[in-house]
Amino acid sequence: MSNMATTLRLQAIALAVLLSRLAPASAKLQPPPLGIARPGCRDRCGNITVPYPFGIGAGCHRDDGLQGFQLVCDDTRSPPRLTIYGYNYQLSSLALDAGEARTYLNATRQCYNATGGFIGGRTSDTYMSLGTSPYLFSPAKNRLVALGCPNLGYFSDMAGYYVSGCMSVCRPSQYAIPGECTGVGCCQSAIPPGVNFFEPNTLNVPQGQGDSTFNTNVTRCRYVFLVEAEWFRYSDSVYLNRTDDFAVPVVLDWAVRNVGNCSAAKRNTTDYACRSANSGCVDSSNGAGYRCNCSKGYEGNPYLNDGCRDIDECQHKDEYPCYGVCTNTPGNYTCKCPPGTSGDASTQNGCRDKDKFTLALKVVTGVSVGVFLSVFVCFWLYLGLQKRKLIRTKQKFFEQNGGVLLQQQMRSYSSAGAGAGGFKIFSKEELEKATINFADDRVLGRGGHGIVYKGILEDETVVAIKKSKMMEEAQTKEFAREMFILSQINHRNVVKLLGCCLEVEVPMLVYEFVSNGTLYHYIHDKDLKADITFDTRLRIAVESAEALAYMHSSASPPILHGDVKTANILLDDKLTAKVSDFGASKLAPTDEAEIATLVQGTCGYLDPEYLMTCQLTDKSDVYSFGVVLLELLTRKKALYLDGPEENRSLVSSFMTALKAGRYEELLDSQVRNEMRADVLEEIAHLVVRCLSMSGEERPTMKEAAERLEMLRRYQQHPWVQAGGNAEERQNLLGMEQQNLPYKFRQQDVLDLEEGSTYTFSL
């Protein structure tokens, strides 16, 4: 029994040893080779690999209705011969990734005797027709070559039309110029893409009879052929004296061409050629069609199911260097330093001892972090101080400009249920963003009070932002209150004040944007030959007068503009007038006190009484409006500094002409042609009253607006336009006058100059 037990133990030990030796071998088993052809099909013909979609025999190739993927292998030859089924063209190689195939083609040859007579050559088996196969001649890899001289070589398509060609000539050897196939003895030319037919031709250039220099200036034979560019290397000693036949390699581009490009192929999933899960589609660069490639990190045949397999990068260290622990992953790999080391494992000697490296890294990191934190804290403190300084400065300006009072007014106005009328207090940053930091290309205009910019708010609202130049300290105390009252103005002919910015030294105002510029530019900068109808001028005057009358009579408290002029009257896209720019405006007092202030305004429009008393009244705006009315009628500027002294002022020119009884000469020619005489006298009468030296003799803005509106209705009345008789027109004018609170006297004498009177007969 003991012997048997001993025997069994020995057998067990032997079996264990055998299994231990077999285990490593089984662990090192390699996966089966990557599939090239379909299962059960030949993948080689001689030394040429035949990958699917190509195949030898039935069922072994891709069948898409086009000949070309089916190949024939003739094993009876040595070496075996691989040809394209149906074409009998021999292939010398097939490349799956590059999408190329190589074949051989005979060169066309024509030979001549010493006198230039044709003695024979080879023109058969020198053309190739690829039809509707997957193949096309590669324009990138092939060149058309013509050898011999003189020789004009070319080839044509199936219809006989020229495709490509070149000409070579000869030079005596003593004048030979070095160079490879550049036109002397040999020439070459590129071919276009999409070519599937090649038929070469040569054109003989006859030589003179008995040419004694034949042997040096011409060759016996001339050749034309299509050839792989990298294969062909020209040498005059090799090719110029050839008289035999030879074949040259030609590169063909192949692709799946039955459905078009990738996008069309992917829609037809049943016929889609890229069958492997880890594959992609690439459009053909030569003609219609597509090819398939394995995704990055995979290799194999993308035309077969599961044909693309993961690359084990760890087994290809030449391509994927790793000097540490390499771990393969699907489509990629990782490379890490061995335990106890750290660094870059993809470079040689990149992994270092972890303890030393960590210590050095900690020291460097500690110092760097310390320096960085110190700099960061200092920088943060500096920014904090600057930010606090900026906030204090903004708050100072905000309080100085009456911002606290304005906020209280807005809150009390809202609590009363009236709302704030859309008025908003903007921050400086909002307006900077709206104007792209007040860029020069956003400037709409420049004036005495400041610069106006075009701005676009965050809600895409287009606005006009006025950035004032300076402001008196006394003005800032009442600024916020006045701005809030101005914001409550809601009149179609007054530019709406949308808000303001008070956190800057000089407050900025935000107005609605009016698109068509100023009345000044409309009547003065416009082509002087361009028509501006009298009705348009009268309508603009009426709308401007109504806006000023509204501010004088309907606003609470009343508002005096203080700088009425054509540059402060804007026009929208329909030429509707909108009065703007309240830079010199004031609120009328609620008690009996007069307004005494520094004189502001624009020369040529200033009320003479205001200049003498420094007291701004509603009649000061009436005087300035009279000048605007004169500009509309005459289309002349209020002040001409370059002209003669007596003609520099439009008002003085008008008064002088009125005194001489020829004021009509000042009027614009179109006004004289369109305005009736009775309307002219009425308007002239109104202008004279507005320009009176005494404010008490001037009409109110409401009177002026009503008078102009009456004249506009009268001018537009059908009786007047039809040229009715004078009695009818007088009755109509009288009817219109009855609607006014003031009726002009028929004999109204105005004291315009001391000792002079002027009478209007109506």
Image (cartoon, rainbow, N blue to C red):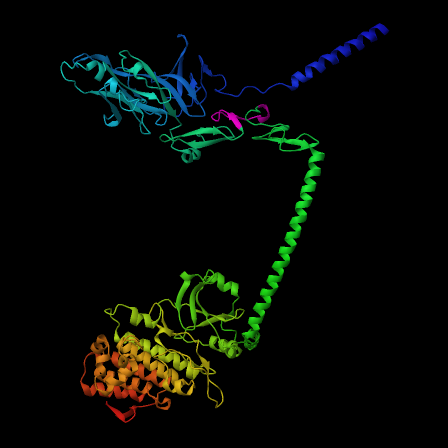
Residue 736, position as x, y percentages in the image: 29, 86
Viewer-side residue, 253 vs 240: 240
Based on the picture, tell me whether residue 227 belongs to the magenta stretch. no
Q: Residue 740's spot in the image, x, y percent?
A: 33, 88
Q: Count all numbered tags in the image, as a single digit.
A: 0
Please indicate whether residue 90 sits to the left or right of residue 656 in the image: right
Give residue 126's quadrant in the image.
Answer: top left
Q: Hey, which residue is sitting farthest left in the picture?
A: 209
Whether residue 274 is visible to the viewer of this picture, yes or no, is no
Q: Is residue 475 above or below residue 319?
A: below
Residue 451 spot, x, y in % from top left:
42, 68
Say above or below: 395 vs 311. below
Residue at 56% x, 71% y: name it.
398
Residue 525 figure quarter: bottom left
Residue 429, percent from left and from top: 52, 63
Residue 374 or 396: which is nearer the viewer?
374
State whether residue 248 is above or below residue 468: above
Question: Which quadrant: the N terminus?
Answer: top right
Depth order, front residue of 330/408: 408
Against 524, residue 356 (above or below) is: above
Query: Magenta stretch containing residue 304, yes or no?
Result: yes
Instruction: Give the residue at the far front of this rendering.
Output: 174
* Residue 160 in sight: yes
Which residues are drawn in magenta?
A: 298-315
Residue drawn at (25%, 18%), measured in percent from left and top? 174
- Image quadrant for the C terminus? bottom left
Residue reaching furthest to the top: 3
Between 109 and 62, the residue placed more toward the observer is 109
